[in-house]
Image (spheres, rainbow, N blue to C red):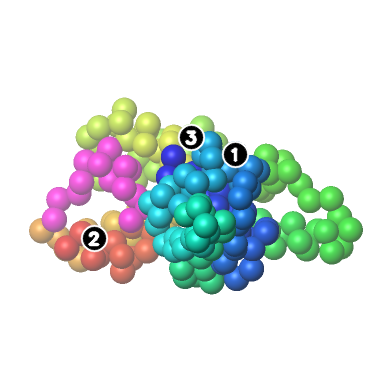
Amino acid sequence: MFHARWCKLGAYIKEHGEQGEITLNPPSRTFCFMMQISAFHELHDVLLRLPNITVSNTVSSDNNITVSLFIKVTHWHKYQGDLSTNRVKKYRAKKSFHETANETPKKRGEEKRGEENNNTPISPESFQQLWERYPNKDGRKSAQKHFNASVKTEDDLKNINLALDNYLAHLKTETWKKPKNGSTWLNNWQDWVNVERAKAWNE
C-alpha cells in the first residue's frame, strides 16, 4: 500500500507540482481519492509515513484546522533520471527512429520472431556430431537435453563447437585433468566460449 501511494504521489506531483514540491488546500477530494484517504485532515499523518517525503502543514489560528499542506519529495531530481534497462532504452530508441522516418515500428512479438528467423535452425544430426568429438561419454541422455535447450541456431552450434575446441585444447595442456562427464560439460559449455574466462572458472 505504501509503495503504491508513494508512486501515485510522485506522479501527481510531477503533473501538478513543480520541482518535486506541491501545496494542497482542502478538501482536495481528487487527491484524497487517488491516495485512498477518506478526508483531507488524515493526509498529513499518512504522507509522513512515506519514504523521502517532507510534509508541513499550515494551521488556522482560529480553529486549529489545517488550511494547507506543503509536500516535498527529497532527492526529486534523482528520481527523474532515466533508470530504464538497456533493453527498454534500445526499444525506445528504435521506436523513436521509426517515428522520425515515418515508418511503422514492429510490434514486440513480430520483432522477436524476425530476430529468430535470422538464425538458421540446426540439423538433427548436430548433437551426434558433437558427441562423437567429446571424450567422456557419460550422461548422454542428460547431455542431449542440455544441448537441445541451449543450442537452437547455427550461431549457437558455432559457439558450442568453439567451446569444445577450447576445452579439448585445455585438456591437452593440463594432461592430469580428466574430462568432465558429457552432461556436466554440456550444462556449462558457454563458459568455454571465452578461453580466459574458462581458465579462470576451471582453476
Left or right: 3, with 172 as reference point: right
- Per the image, the residue denoted by label 2 is 201
Give the number of the disc on residue 125.
Answer: 3
Image quadrant containing the C terminus: bottom left
| Magenta segment boundaries in residue numbering | 177-191
Looking at the picture, how far across and down is residue 131, in whole percent? 35, 39
Query: Which of the marked residues, 1 or 2, is nearer the chain's N terminus?
Result: 1
Q: Could you tell me the amino acid type at mark 3?
A: Glu
Task: Look at the image and tell me whether residue 90 can be seen.
Answer: no
Q: Is residue 185 magenta?
A: yes
Instruction: Name the one closer to the observer, 31 or 126.
Output: 31
Q: Secondary structure at mark 2?
A: helix
Left or right: 95, with 13 as reference point: right
How many numbered circles does the render carry?
3
- Per the image, the residue denoted by label 1 is 33
| Marks 3, 2: nearer the viewer | 2
Q: Is residue 5 above or below residue 71?
A: above
Q: Quadrant of residue 94?
A: bottom right
Q: Could you tell me the amino acid type at mark 1?
A: Phe
Task: Look at the image and tell me whether residue 101 can be seen.
Answer: yes
Q: Could you tell me the amino acid type at mark 2?
A: Trp
Distance from label 1 to label 2 (Cα)? Answer: 56 Å
Looking at the picture, how far across and down is residue 181, in whole percent? 21, 41
Residue at the spot x=34%, y=50% of the render? Answer: 189
